[in-house]
């Protein structure tokens, strides 16, 4: 059984004042609204639950994730904007018959995948008695200015280059082709693959441990007959080229243009001909130890799921 008082105390220390606040809005004369985090200390959500009839095998042995897993995550069904009146961070500790399941949900308006796992890593460090975090988060906000844009022009060519094809890109290409093949698309119909590209390694001014959202979604497009008829090598190359073109200039242009013409990605805007990748196998998921040993499996909840969504998790290290 989990030591609830200890783990909840360590969560309070790890959940910075931003994650303990709420979303707030500012209305402008041109009928637009912007969101910001009100650090009002309204608090995060912490739940201690028990599922005495559920074992570890019940969770990790089935080929498909059991539906009961969804109940192990808090704040299910909430949309990001509902963070105005709901917690931005929720933790649910569930005692199983022979183990412990830690469910964590964070509002995506507050943090991206890297920041989520950074919080989780910090939380586990604190739980094991660390006084000083090995990688403290950086909360200083970053915005482009003319000086940064000038630096961009000097580095633009250096930031764009050819990268070796990775095994991950090859796998995603294979999944894209398999999805389109099994959906029996018209050969001339255009299909899309949406990839998420991180900003931390591309924006020189942005710290590696920056806490927040720092990513950009890009779309690779091919006709079904090209996707299926030209072999996987060409598909991988198209994805590789798209990612290679995303550099410092791309992000700064996006950050400058978005406030002028904002576009919000919604689940309803996603089509069945466009697989979408999220998360990353590079996140430190299995290195977390709260004093009970390292995790034996990682699963995700019901949030942010739709037709074509592909969530990337690393495998357990043997």
Image (cartoon, rainbow, N blue to C red):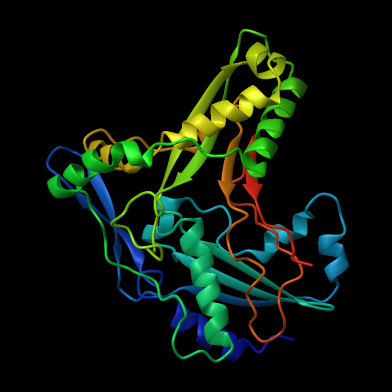
Residue 192 percent location from the top left of the image: 56, 25
Residue plotted at (63% across, 75% down): 288
Q: In this view of the protein, which residue sits in the foreground, 305 or 200? A: 200
Tell me the quadrant of the picture where the C terminus can be found.
bottom right
Q: Is residue 66 above or below residue 56?
A: above
Q: In this view of the protein, which residue sits in the foreground, 225 or 244? A: 244
Q: In this view of the protein, which residue sits in the foreground, 162 or 10? A: 162
- Left or right relative to 233: residue 129: left
Residue 180: image quadrant is: top right
Residue 232: image quadrant is: top right
Residue plotted at (19% across, 38% down): 31
Residue 12 percent location from the top left of the image: 46, 82
Q: In this view of the protein, which residue sits in the foreground, 254 or 74? A: 254
Q: Can residue 299 be seen at all in this image of the molecule? A: yes
- Left or right relative to 76: residue 170: right
- Left or right relative to 163: residue 305: right
Q: Can residue 269 be seen at all in this image of the molecule? A: no
Residue plotted at (32% across, 58% down): 206
């Amino acid at each position: 059984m989990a030591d609830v008082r200890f783990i909840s105390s360590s969560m309070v220390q790890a959940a910075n004042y931003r994650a303990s606040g709420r979303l707030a809005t500012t209305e402008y004369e041109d009928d637009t609204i912007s969101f910001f985090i009100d650090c009002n200390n309204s608090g995060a959500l912490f739940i201690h639950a028990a599922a005495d009839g559920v074992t570890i095998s019940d969770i990790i042995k089935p080929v498909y994730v059991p539906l009961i897993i969804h109940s192990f995550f808090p704040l299910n069904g909430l949309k990001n904007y509902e963070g105005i009146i709901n917690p931005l961070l929720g933790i649910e500790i569930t005692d199983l018959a022979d183990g412990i399941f830690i469910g964590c949900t964070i509002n995506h308006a507050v943090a991206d995948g890297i920041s989520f796992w950074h919080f989780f890593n910090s939380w586990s460090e604190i739980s094991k008695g660390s006084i000083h975090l090995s990688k403290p988060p950086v909360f200083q906000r970053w915005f482009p200015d003319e000086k940064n844009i000038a630096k961009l022009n000097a580095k633009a060519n250096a930031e764009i280059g050819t990268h070796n094809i990775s095994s991950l890109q090859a796998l995603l290409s294979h999944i894209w082709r398999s999805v389109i093949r099994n959906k029996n698309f018209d050969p001339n119909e255009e299909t899309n693959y949406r990839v998420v590209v991180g900003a931390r390694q591309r924006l020189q001014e942005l710290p590696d441990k920056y806490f927040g959202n720092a990513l950009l979604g890009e779309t690779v497009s091919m006709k079904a007959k090209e996707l299926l008829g030209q072999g996987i090598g060409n598909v991988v190359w198209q994805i590789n080229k798209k990612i290679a073109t995303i550099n410092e200039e791309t992000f700064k242009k996006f950050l400058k243009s978005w406030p002028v013409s904002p576009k919000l990605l919604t689940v309803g805007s996603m089509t069945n001909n466009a697989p979408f990748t999220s998360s990353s196998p590079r996140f430190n998921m299995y290195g977390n130890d709260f004093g009970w040993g390292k995790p034996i499996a990682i699963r995700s909840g019901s949030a942010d799921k739709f037709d074509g969504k592909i969530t990337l998790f690393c495998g357990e290290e043997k």
